[in-house]
Amino acid sequence: MLPGTPYSVLVVSSGQKINDFLCEALEPATYSPVVFAKSGGEARNILITQSFDLIIINAPLSDEFGSDLALKITENSVSAVILIVKSELYDEVSDQVEQFGVLAVSKPTTRAVFMQVLRMSIATLERLRRLEKENKKLSLKLDEIKLVNRAKWVLIEYLKMSEPQAHRYIEKQAMDMRITKREVAESIIRNYES
C-alpha cells in the first residue's frame, strides 16, 4: 500500500457488530473516507454518484443477500470487493463470486484473517489499476495508428502519394513542427476532408 494514499471504502452492512469491527480494522490513515450503507438499495444509490476503491458487503443485507450487488460492482468498476458471509454458506457463495474477482470471507472471522483478505484486495486493486492504465495507453496508441493510417490514405487519394511517401511525409512533418504524428494526421484530415 502506498503511504499517504488512502483508499476510499464503502461498507454495505446492516449489522452493527460487523460495522464496529470494520471501524476498528479500517485505519483512517490507510482507509478514508469510510462510508456506510445499510442496504443494497442504499449502496446502489451511493454508487451512482461516488466510486470507491474498496467495497465490503456483509451478507445478508436487509433487502437482498448481497452477492448480486457484489457481482454488479465488479461489472461496472475496478473496485476491490469483499463479501462477508456466514461460514455455512461460504463454500457455495465463494464458488459463485470468486470467479468474478470478489473475495469471500466467512464469518465469524478474526482480525488477522480479515486484514490478510483486506491486503489481498488492495493488492488486486493495484494490479487492476495498472492493467487499466496500460489498456488505456494501448487504446490511445491504437487510435493514433488508425488516425495516421487514415491521414496516409487522404494523402494517397488527394496528393497521389505512395504509401511510403505518405508515411514519410507525416513523420517529417511531426519532426519538423515538433508535434505528434497524431496532430499531423488530424491536421491533414481536417484540411482535406472538411
Image (spheres, rainbow, N blue to C red):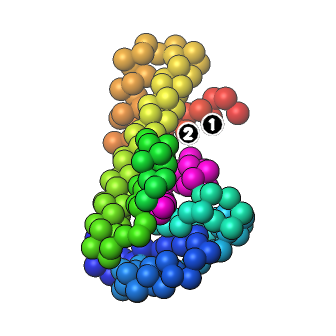
Measure the alpha-carbon separation of dots 2 and 1.
Answer: 5 Å
Give above or below for 135 relative to 162: below
Disc 2 + disc 1, Cβ < 8 Å: yes
Q: Residues within 10 Å of mark 2 (few under 14, many from 20)?
A: few
**Quarter of image, res 118:** bottom left
Q: Tell me the residue that label 2 is attached to.
A: 187
SS at mark 2 in the image? helix
Check the image and report above or below for 70 versus 116: above
Residue 68 on the magenta segment? yes
Q: Is residue 17 above or below residue 172?
A: below
Q: Is residue 140 visible?
A: no
Residue 141, located in which quarter of the rendered image? top left
- Which span of residues is magenta-colored? 67-86
Q: Which residue is mark 1?
A: 190
Describe residue 110's horizontal placement relative to residue 157 as left or right. Answer: left
Q: Is residue 5 magenta?
A: no
